[in-house]
Amino acid sequence: MKKVEAIVRPHVMEAVKTALQEVGVVGMTVTEVKGFGRQKGHTETYRGSEYKVEFLPKVKIEVALPDDLADKAVEAVLKTAATGKFGDGKVFVSSLSEVVRIRTGERGEAAL
Amino acid sequence: MDLAQAKVALDTLWVVVTACLVFFMNAGFATLETGLCQSKNAVNILAKNFIVFAVASIAFWAVGFGLMFGDGNPFVGWNGWFLGGTDNSPATADAYQGVFTALNWTGVPLLAKFFFQLVFAGTAATIVSGAVAERIKFLSFIVFSFVLVAFIYPVGGHWAWGGGFLGTAGFKDFAGSTVVHSIGGWAALAGVAILGPRIGKYGKDGKINPIPAHNMGLATLGTFILWLGWFGFNPGSTMAADVNAIALVALNTNMAAAAGCLAATAVAWVVLGKPDLSMILNGTLAGLVAITAGCAFVTVPASITIGVIGGVLVVFAVLTFDKLKLDDPVGALSVHLVNGVWGTLAVGLFATDGGLFYGGGATLLLTQIKGVLAVGAFTLVASAVIWYALKATIGIRVSPEEERDGLDVGEHGMQAYTGLGSPSPSSALSMSSVSVT
């Protein structure tokens, strides 16, 4: 089982969600996050004082899925989340050692 | 009901309704200040602005109104404690018999006069809360507010409005640029200086670190409420349903607000690079404070001019106070103190009867200057004494740890925005047979 974490621009969240559902993903979790990679922040001013804002708003989408769906999920994210500019984000794929459905206690792939 | 009774009824309705509008300005101050400060201090700022009116109500009823408007001498009133003493309001002028002679010009019941003056006293007290926000001890603020409304504000007010030496010298302050706004401003200045800046606000080499607002929606709503409330503050000060006066005053009030708003926007845009919304809001209030003294005495074009100058002043004042390391999270000093002074002086320039620009010479202007200086010196010194006394006894500033974690938890044991991590009644629900979708 794999976990796919995608950090993307907030405005692509809906498109990524739809694309993931189309490849067979059933559930996901989203969090509002802030972060930066190579995208430069910007300067803001408040009552005459300037300050740099480096942490930029992003959305983190987390999905747990069977191994054979991971590549399709990553493709779905790349297709819908890329704009070609710095700040498009990243996808992290990691192995899940266990998944449990809380309502029934099912474990493993049955819980995905 | 005869005509005379009808006039009393109309005048009383006017006074009480406008007083209610001014009361609601406390909601404006509360939301404006809360919006401009950090979320971790929201409960504390809301609490200060809320409780200060209750404190003012008691202080002014017990002592303040008598000191301000009771018959006495050129420096203090000395009658009318707890609204006692003879009084045959709504009788006016020579027909009036009682201990509140200074208010015998308005034909409404005594309790209406008191209620109207109370909401003005409350406004002066709430001005202080913004300037000292995010590091003042709640109890110290309550105690200071009580003393301000019971003693300091009434003495200054007595000089101008209560039959004291400024009023008799011809000092003009129609609705309180000096009496309300500058008194609040001087008291706030003393507090800001003695309290010190927020931790981290000023760095080495004169660096000014911004501590941005947390909710500009609240701040904007608050400013709208204040603008609306000012339509009670200024026109209500006629304390009579005088059709021409209330129309002129209401319009002057609005035009100065609009002018201040636009002027501050332009100045911020040019000098700071972008039209900072907090400056747009401060500019509007600056115009409103600046026209408060002269709203009944100047023409509409003059009110626009006064507002424009107020809007320009407020932007530069905000920058200047920061350069002087006087940390004022909401711009209260720039709005109320600086423009309270400007508004008072503007009367000496623009009053159609006696203003410098209307052939009146410098007499009125000099009287206005004297008033500004007298009230300023008294309020600054008296406030400093109280702040120092509080600092030496119960302390006025929260601990650095509390300031960093936020006054909401430290002073009030609660948060404004709960959410993740808050207690929920889940343990009571989990074992029950209630079905949850």
Image (cartoon, grey):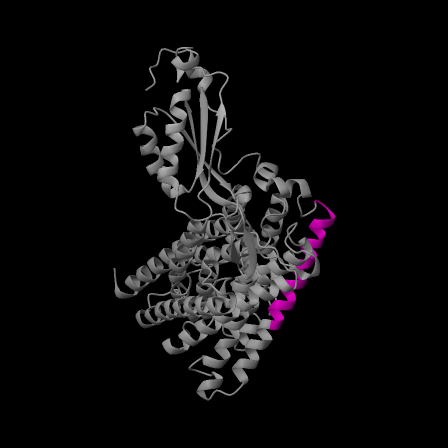
Q: A63 above or below B121?
A: above
Q: Give the quarter of the image for residue B363.
A: bottom right
Q: Give the quarter of the image for residue B209.
A: bottom right
For the point 48% across and 87% down, which residue is it?
B360
For the point 45% across and 22% down, which residue is it?
A2
Describe residue A16's horizontal placement relative to residue B202 as left or right.
left
Q: Is the C terminus of chain B in the top left, top right, bottom left or bottom right quadrant?
A: top left
Most frequent secondary structure within the magenta stretch = helix
Describe residue B279's horizontal placement relative to residue B78 as left or right.
left
Using the image as rendered, state which of residue B120 and residue B3 is in the foreground: B120
Q: B51 above or below B313?
A: above
Question: Quick check: can you spot residue B70?
Answer: no
For the point 38% across and 33% down, which residue is it?
A75
- Place of residue B431 in the rendered image (x, y in percent of width and height, measured from the top left): 42, 11
Using the image as rendered, state which of residue B243 and residue B307 is in the foreground: B307
Using the image as rendered, state which of residue B118 and residue B91 is in the foreground: B118
Question: Quick check: can you spot residue B362?
Answer: yes
- Place of residue B153 in the rendered image (x, y in percent of width and height, measured from the top left): 57, 60
- Place of residue B323 in the rendered image (x, y in percent of width and height, measured from the top left): 63, 64
Describe residue A96's horizontal placement relative to residue B232 as left or right.
right
Residue B176 falls within the magenta-colored stretch: no
Number of numbered discs visible in the structure rendering: 0
- Place of residue B311 in the rendered image (x, y in percent of width and height, measured from the top left): 47, 69
Residue B386 falls within the magenta-colored stretch: yes
Using the image as rendered, state which of residue B112 and residue B250 is in the foreground: B250
For the point 47% across and 60% down, which residue is it?
B276
- Span colored in magenta: B373-394
Q: Is the N terminus of chain B in the top left, top right, bottom left or bottom right quadrant?
A: bottom left
